[in-house]
Amino acid sequence: MQILIWSGAAVSLVGLVGLIWCVARVWTARRARLEDAEMREVLKKVLPVNTGALFLSVIGLMMVVIGILLR
């Protein structure tokens, strides 16, 4: 079960890095004071990455919990 715990932690960490990237990208766009249409384009590109990163984080944490319970 150690493999499940550590692989879950790695998957969760990849998701966390993705979430941090999304926050940094939107923050940069806000500080650039983009026009409404340009900001919408940035958000359209960031949204799928944000959703995927959140999914990876949740799956990774679920793997860790299952690994701990089965231990």
Image (cartoon, grey):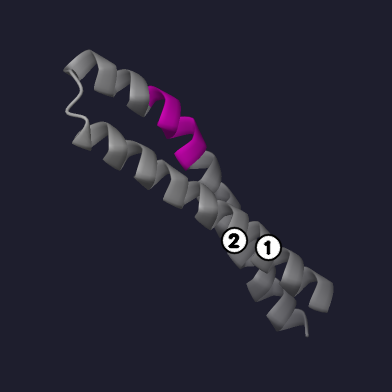
Graded by Cα atoms within 10 Å as few (under 14), some (14 to 19) or many (20 or more), the crowding at tag 1 reads: some
Q: Is residue 26 above or below residue 45?
A: below
Q: Is residue 61 above or below residue 53?
A: below
Q: Amino acid at mark 1?
A: Ala
Q: Amino acid at mark 2?
A: Leu
Give the structural element (helix, strand or loop) at label 1: helix
Q: Which residue in the structure is indicated by mark 2?
A: 13
Secondary structure that dominates the magenta span: helix
Q: How many angstroms separate mark 2 from mark 1 (CA)?
A: 5 Å
Decide if residue 7 is on the left or right side of residue 25: right
Task: Give the image location of residue 62, x and y in percent.
Answer: 62, 65
Q: For the view shown, which residue lies furthest in the top direction? A: 37
Q: For the view shown, which residue lies furthest in the front direction? A: 32
Q: Which residue in the structure is indicated by mark 1?
A: 10
Q: Is residue 46 above or below residue 44?
A: below
Observer-nearest residue: 62 or 32? 32
Would you identify the image quadrant in which residue 6 lies? Answer: bottom right
Q: Residue at x 53, y 53 (%)?
A: 17
Task: Give the image location of residue 69, x and y in percent.
Answer: 70, 81
CB atoms of marks 2 and 1 within 8 Å: yes
Decide if residue 57 is on the left or right side of residue 6: left
- Region in magenta: 44-50
Quadrant (top left/top right/bottom left/bottom right) for the N terminus: bottom right
Please tell me how many numbered marks the rendered image carries: 2
Q: Residue at x 43, y 25 (%)?
A: 45
